[in-house]
């Protein structure tokens, strides 16, 4: 059997001489499959969600355990909410909530960058990594700086790891491509506490890190999204002179993890009024918000 070529993957790499590790993301079919359930989203909303998926997958691929990672971006812009739900190691589902009128207005006026569509709010990542570990949530503010910078700040604040994140998505001839690329500094002397005892910590930025960040910044979005600029080619182009090591690709797929049992448990927690609103002729019908699948319960099943 010949395996189908992997088109949806994360590529881990390490640059020995610059003390950095990184990840690249390449998602095509996966994005198309997630968005098949959300054909009513305007294209710029689909694009932002695709960028969120690339970020959530790269973030999740850093975790070795089983469990679940939920990334939520809640904002006051035309897009109100993006949720990417990753069931480790490889299942992804996602949805967005947005204001139709404000998105239409943004499209008309051309203000459709990710930062413009998000506006202000926060990025939260909840990790539920199995029995032995507590649920953990990290949160970072989004104050108009967009998703890439919020992601950098998330890693800086939650893990004290200097990070440079790039995210870009584009639809060409009806097919989506989302690319992500990030590097993290793993210095020998990691972090030095502020001398004034403030809660912030100051990271010693060495020349290697400055050089690596500058290299990643030189890549234009338009270039990053070219079909043949795969993460492996980009990593090679930027870092092949600095002892680049590429690790095996990690594949991801679009798959909703909803089930009758899960939805039944969820609906059972609704208030009497909410259940009464949903009930028609003694039956409660609920659609999965992620994949649209319909589940029907008898009223007594969700009491
Ligand atoms: Zn579902």
Image (spheres, rainbow, N blue to C red):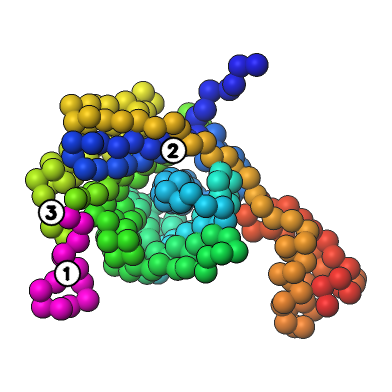
Residue 271 visible, this angle: yes
Asked whether mark 2 and ligand 1 are closer than 8 Å, the reply comes as no
Instruction: State the mark number for residue 10.
Output: 2
Residue occupying the point 37% across, 58% down: 117
Of callouts 2 and 1, the N-terminal one: 2
Residue 100 visible, this orientation:
no
Q: CA distance from mark 2 to mark 3?
A: 27 Å
Q: In the figure, residue 268 lies in which quadrant?
A: bottom right
Q: Which residue is mark 1?
A: 193
Closer to the observer: label 2 or label 1? 1
Q: Is residue 215 above or below residue 60?
A: above
| Picture quarter with the C terminus | bottom right
Q: Determine which residue is flagged by label 3.
A: 205
Report the Cα–Cα distance between label 2 and label 1.
33 Å
Q: Position of residue 195 (x, y in %)?
A: 10, 74
Residue at the bottom extreme of this rendering: 272
214 left or right of 252? left
* Camera-side mark, 2 or 3: 3
Label 2: state its secondary structure.
Answer: strand
């Amino acid at each position: 059997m010949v395996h189908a070529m992997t088109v949806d993957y994360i590529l881990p790499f390490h640059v020995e001489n610059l003390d950095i590790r990184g990840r690249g993301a390449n998602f095509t079919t996966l994005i198309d499959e997630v968005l098949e359930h959300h054909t009513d989203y305007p294209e710029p909303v689909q694009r932002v969600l695709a960028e969120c998926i690339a970020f959530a997958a790269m973030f999740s691929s850093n975790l070795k355990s089983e469990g679940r990672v939920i990334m939520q971006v809640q904002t006051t812009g035309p897009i109100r909410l993006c949720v990417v739900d990753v069931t480790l190691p490889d299942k992804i589902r996602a949805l967005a909530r947005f204001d139709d009128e404000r998105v239409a207005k943004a499209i008309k006026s051309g203000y459709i960058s990710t930062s413009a569509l998000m506006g202000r709010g926060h990025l939260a990542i909840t990790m539920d990594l199995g029995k032995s570990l507590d649920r953990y949530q990290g949160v970072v503010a989004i104050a108009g700086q967009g998703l890439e910078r919020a992601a950098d700040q998330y890693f800086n604040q939650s893990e004290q790891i200097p990070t440079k994140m790039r995210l870009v998505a584009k639809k060409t001839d009806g097919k989506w491509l989302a690319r992500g690329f990030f590097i993290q500094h793993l210095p020998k002397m990691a972090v030095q506490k502020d001398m004034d005892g403030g809660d912030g910590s100051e990271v010693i930025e060495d020349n290697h890190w400055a050089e690596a960040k500058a290299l990643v910044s030189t890549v234009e979005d338009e270039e990053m999204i070219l079909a043949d600029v795969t993460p492996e080619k980009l990593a090679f182009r930027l870092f092949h002179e600095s002892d680049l090591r590429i690790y095996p690709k990690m594949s991801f797929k679009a798959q909703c993890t909803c089930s009758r049992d899960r939805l039944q448990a969820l609906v059972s927690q609704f208030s009497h009024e909410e259940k009464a609103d949903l009930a028609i002729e003694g039956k409660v019908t609920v659609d999965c918000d992620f994949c649209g699948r319909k589940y029907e319960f008898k009223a007594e099943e969700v009491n």
